[in-house]
Image (tube, helix red, strand yellow):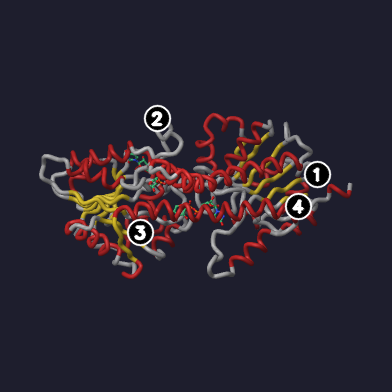
Amino acid sequence: MTNILCIGAGYVGGSTMPIVASHCPQHRFVVVDINEARIAAWQSDKLPIYEPGLDEVVRKTRDKNLFFSTDVDKHIAEADIIFVSVNTPTKTFGQGAGKAADLQYWEKTARQILENSTSSKIVVEKSTLPVRTAEAMERILNSNGKSLHFDVLSNPEFLAEGTAVRDMENPDRVLIGGRETESGQKAVEALVELYANWIPRERIITSNLWSSELSKLVANAFLAQRISSINAISALCEKTEADVSEVAHAIGLDNRIGKYFLRASVGFGGSCFKKDILHLVYLCEQYGLPEVATYWEQVVTMNEYQEMRFTSNMVASMFNTVAGKRIALFGTAFKANTNDTRESPALEVCRTLLEEHAEVVMTDPHAIENARYDLGELAQRVIFEPDPYTAAKGAHAIAILTEWSQYTQLDYEKIYVSMVKPAFLFDGRNLLDHRKLYEVGFNVYPIGKPALTHLHSQ
Ligand code: UDX
Ligand code: UDX
């Protein structure tokens, strides 16, 4: 039996460890976090994150070979392998503010591992980190007077929220980076063995430490770049009467391009894309590559432009003013099937509409509480309403901001009747049947397609 510890019970640690535990009944897993409320939630019937299929995996493993605890020190002492998935937010102060990663939690965790260790261990970076962090961590860990040896591995997480269970059960690949020393390679092999309990060996790839760290940033940068690329084209489509879905379909059938991540939207959100691209930009700047930095920074700039363009279009279409108008935002989560609202475009749209003095109502099947929390003081000016029908009642406009399938099932005739006329619908996810909505009476504004409006004929 191997004792496996994960430090950080957030979206990453909390959703991956139960799945690993379910495939490795011979090992013992503990997930620790300094946040007591979070650990209590992991031990309860209402998990702190909404992730389809996760409840079942947790129920199957919890208190058998998977345990949640706040006693970080004790479990460090007992562990053979430690995964670290504490958060690495963008720095808000000092050098690199706004771009570089804030590594204070990581370093603190490394020191805590050192203080509480009485045996040699493998430490696995699961958090996304700037390239060469593993090296710094190795230095801290191995500068000990205890003659203990620590091997630091990089094992980036590629799962996406909303499909975390499926992604972890059946990943495209698992990447493990390690030192090319004998002990480094032994550590890599130990981690390969763990994953080989359910993942075919050919999908478990290994590399040197820095390639692995960099690959995570690059994977996210490439994914986000595709969204910014199609969103840039959506702006052009709106001017030329081309249809961005048709363009995406046509180009995506070319195998060299591929069909994924070409859905034009109000913008990408989530805790990873923006943060990781800004890490990459900072790294390039630090290594004296300003052209490369500027190239990648454009992906974030384009995303901000897309969010801004969406709200400007709302205001312009609604006769250049939304002051005092009730506007219902459908969806607060950054994507469907998660309760996560970090960097959600819905929050950005909400902030802009509040600046325009609109009366904003937000609805979401799972993410209202997180939206309230993430909006901070502004939340006091927002009406949160779990029922979409009530949210839309008396509204001048609806904006679809998360692609929840629930929103395709609503009775839009009933909604239309309850709204102020002319009724507007802005579909930031191209989720709904626009022609049908137009026939119901809505003035419909999709992304990257011609608007369907009754206004010009009046
Ligand atoms: C985090 C990072 O944001 C991401 O870059 C990385 O790839 C994986 O880890 P996530 O799990 O989504 O992703 O973050 P979050 O939900 O904020 O969870 C981090 C957890 O670590 C929190 O529950 C926090 O309480 C905990 N933590 C943080 C510790 O237990 N100890 C610390 O010192 C700091
Ligand atoms: C992402 C990566 O996909 C994952 O591999 C990594 O481990 C973490 O970051 P995540 O942020 O959870 O995962 O979700 P993802 O599905 O990538 O979506 C990110 C954002 O892009 C969402 O706001 C989503 O709505 C948006 N998106 C995605 C689009 O606007 N268009 C698309 O075609 C795809």
Where does label 1 land, which residue?
Answer: 422
- The amino acid at mark 1 is Pro
Where does label 4 land, which residue?
Answer: 451
How far is the residue under mark 3 from the one under mark 1?
Answer: 50 Å
Query: x and y percent of residue 353 in the render?
Result: 66, 36
Secondary structure under the numbered disc 2 in the rendered image: loop
How far is the residue under mark 1 from the one under mark 2?
Answer: 50 Å
Q: Nearer the viewer, mark 3 or mark 4?
A: 4
Q: Is residue 171 visible?
A: yes
Relative to 373, 93 lies left or right: left
- The amino acid at mark 4 is Ala
Is 101 above or below relative to 121? above
2 or 4: tag closer to the N-terminus: 2
Q: Nearer the viewer, mark 4 or mark 1?
A: 4
Where does label 2 land, which residue?
Answer: 94
How far is the residue under mark 3 from the one under mark 2?
Answer: 38 Å
Relative to 81, 354 lies left or right: right
Residue for point 22% across, 61% down: 190
